[in-house]
Amino acid sequence: MANIDLYFKMAEQRINWVDWAKVITIILVVFGHCSFWGEAVFFQNLVYSFHVPLFFLLSGYLHKDSSDFKSYISKNVKSLVVPYLLLNILVLCCVILPGMILHNNFMHFEYYITCILIGYGHAPAGPCWFLVCLFLVKIYAYAILKSKLPLQIAVMVVAPLIAIFVLVVVSNESVNFLLSNPLYSFCAIPFFIVGYHLKKVDLPTILTRRLAVFIALVALAFLVALNEVQGFAGLGAFGRYPLLYYPAAFIGCILVICVCLLLNNKQNKMIITLSSGTILILALHPVLYKIFAKFGQMPHSALPNIVVSILITILLYYPIVIVQKYIPVLIGRRKIKINQP
């Protein structure tokens, strides 16, 4: 009982709706990586249109300014780059390499190492490409957020246009392989900057429950309509009409934020823990999904897949607790600190 009291004392220092948003978003990331067939692909496309942008927006919301570039870089290397490398090495050594040894087939080993070094999505802990991308965004943000608002807006427009031109117009496979993270980070800048400025607004006060419900319903309707038009779209893959990607992504972000504001008065130990360990969930959920797939036929429709996604996320609760206690470096030294009364 004392431990629970301490957890909730610590929770008072956190932004509760952001914890909810991080957990819901990581569940949607897991959901997006499930297998879908037929009409159910629409729900996968719906989630892909905004789940990664929302993580960048939340990262911008939680961003703290710094006057010391050296300490700023050091902090973000420890919280993003080091976990990225360690988690990829962990999955490579504990999951992929044993299979290579068993079958005496090391043909793809060099490819995996290359993917790790360039932050490509086919690395052993593939979804962790996000950590490298966020690190790059934070480097840009250090300079961008010190400039005046008109220049920030200009960067928010120009940077994605450069990325869209290279990824859509040039559309070169080798360029995408080698420069995917730099280009994706250009695409992510608008979400990060908007998130940064959003923290200046007292959202829980401005958005009453009725208003939050109304906005969420309107956002859902627009999001569904846009995805009917767009088809598959994501960061670096902009759908049929690239200019519609950002409106759809921001609308999806608004939808989830409104839902999380409705949950703002509900604090939960599991939500706090899962929120603080999203990096571990990002890295390990494909491994769990493959284990599940070996033991039975995985679902291919939306509702069963959301159940699987929630189950995978919950199963990683205790690994997060263990890592926080014994190996916090794996999740960027995000050890939960509880002040004793």
Image: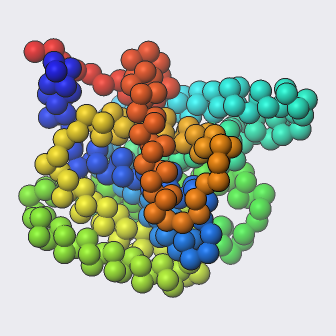
Q: Position of residue 258 (x, y in %)?
A: 24, 63
Q: In this view, does 262 lie above or below 131?
A: below
Taking the image as drawn, is residue 134 in sight?
yes
Q: Is residue 42 above or below residue 103?
A: below
Q: Position of residue 119 (x, y in %)?
A: 64, 43
Specify the quadrant that holds the N terminus.
top left
Residue 204 is left or right of residue 239, and the answer is left
Residue 161 is left or right of residue 61, and the answer is right
Q: Residue at x 71, y 26 (%)?
A: 93
Q: Residue at x 57, y 55 (%)?
A: 33
Q: In this view, does 177 lie above or below 238?
A: above
Q: Where is residue 253 in the image (x, y as percent from the top left)?
A: 35, 63
Specify the quadrant that holds the C terminus.
top left
**Front-most of 182 and 66?**
182
Residue 72 is left or right of residue 86, and the answer is left
Q: Residue at x 47, y 50 (%)?
A: 309
Q: Residue at x 31, y 61 (%)?
A: 256
Q: What is the count of numbered marks?
A: 0
**Front-most of 338 and 71?**
338
Taking the image as drawn, is residue 65 in sight?
no
**Front-most of 38 and 244?**
38
**Front-most of 232 and 311?**
311
Q: How is the image coloured?
A: rainbow
Q: In this view, does 294 lie above or below 222?
A: above
Classify residue 322 by image quadrant: top left
Q: Outermost residue, front direction?
A: 296
Q: Where is residue 306 in the image (x, y as percent from the top left)?
A: 45, 57
